[in-house]
Amino acid sequence: MRVAVTGAGGRLGTALVAALTGSGSIDEVLAWDLPEHDLDDPESAMRLIGRNRPDVAIHAAAWTDVDGCARDPQLAMRRNGTAAGEMAQACATNGTALIAVSTNEVFDGLRTDGRPYGAADLPSPANAYGAAKLAGERLAREAFWATGDDFAAAALMPPGGRSNTVPPLAIVRTAWLFGPPGADFPAKILAAADRARAKNETLDLVSDEFGCPTYAADLAAAITSMVEFVGKKGRNAVGGIHHVTNGGHASRAEWAREVLRLAGVTVPTRDVPLSAWPRPSTPPLWGVLEPTPLPGGPLRDWQAALAEYATIGPRTKEPPR
Ligand SMILES: NC(=O)c1ccc[n+]([C@@H]2O[C@H](COP(=O)([O-])OP(=O)(O)OC[C@H]3O[C@@H](n4cnc5c(N)ncnc54)[C@H](OP(=O)(O)O)[C@@H]3O)[C@@H](O)[C@H]2O)c1
């Protein structure tokens, strides 16, 4: 099998290329990033997919600067919406199965019943990043099956069942990614803790925003299992919407405290609401996804994944005072 990865130099892309390269079922991994693959170029996807005709493409490239997306929703729509549709069109035309990576931010997070968002729940994004990613999901679905807008259905089936001649589209929604090369939430919390300690201040932690911290390496392994499953069971095996996160959920404050604990950093902390932290983009307050069953079983809990990450970065020991 030949598998292409877009955004190959990003947090997830790097982990994906490593996991796919280590898989015995995959013969070749095509790692695409700027400038070869450009979300701003409408021809980019068709050119690359048409030239290489991979069996599976994993579309991990995105403009992930959520505040940038809020400042320029049109550019967000181009990169995270339209470009995802173009990738899907290129894949559908060339017989390539597509795994399109999406986000918990397709949900507004206003749910108050304490239940996680399932794959069959109706998305309703509350910010420009989420709106563009949802547009990307919809355009991808249209490109593959032109089935209309039946987002109540978890499985992406055309009327009358799944066609054997059409390759599958899988949408993998995830949340709160962390992992190499750093510059992630754990790294930001450790840097903020350093600043607070240097100034003898209390570290403010947002306690009313919830999500599922997810280790990029674990997500990459899960997506690799999906690709291997395609190899073993046939292309239609993985179609549909999948929610893939580490197990459990946390508030930003709980996640931050675990990061500090694992790094052995002590600093006085104070819980604050998200509203105390004004920023251009409004994240979902309740961004918790219900994981869908995976070929390789559920991912471990986020605390175990974070503990493993703490042994390699973003920092393993307390900095000098
Ligand atoms: N990070 C999260 O917490 C999170 C949560 C939910 C879902 N997701 C989704 O997961 C996927 C991977 O996210 P990530 O955290 O790995 O993001 P990331 O580290 O920001 O990586 C994004 C990748 O996309 C590339 N890219 C950015 N702008 C591009 C453009 N105009 N043309 C072509 N490539 C471009 C980047 O290249 P450069 O590095 O060269 O800019 C990078 O390789 C995305 O689909 C994202 O929406 C992420």
Image: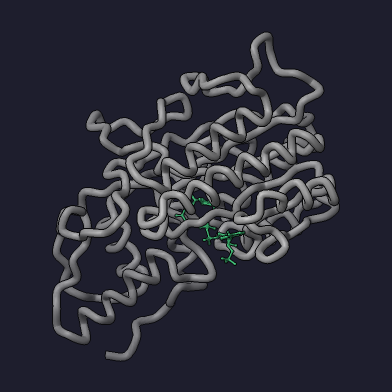
Residue 17 at x, y percent in the picture = 69, 59
Residue 70 at x, y percent in the picture = 36, 53
Toward the viewer: 284 or 208?
284
Residue 194 at x, y percent in the picture = 28, 81
Q: Is residue 113 visible?
A: yes
Q: Which residue is depicted at the point 33% across and 41% down?
A: 126
Q: Is residue 231 left or right of residue 185?
A: right
Q: Which residue is depicted at the point 74% across and 34% down?
A: 92
Residue 28 at x, y percent in the picture = 83, 55
Please state the total of marks drawn on the protein image. Answer: 0
Q: Quadrant of residue 260?
A: bottom left
* Rendered-image quadrant of the C terminus: bottom left
42 lies above or below 229: below
Coloring applied to the structure: one colour
192 lies above or below 278: below
Toward the viewer: 38 or 179?
38
18 lies above or below 234: below
Q: Quadrant of residue 276?
A: bottom left
219 lies above or below 181: above
Q: Which residue is depicted at the point 60% across and 44% down?
A: 84
Q: Is residue 20 left or right of residue 140?
A: right
* Rendered-image quadrant of the N terminus: top right
Q: Quadrant of ligand 1?
A: bottom right
Q: Quadrant of residue 100?
A: top right
Q: Is residue 238 visible?
A: no
Q: Which residue is depicted at the point 32% across and 58% down?
A: 255
Give the farthest residue toward the top: 160
Toward the viewer: 300 or 275?
275
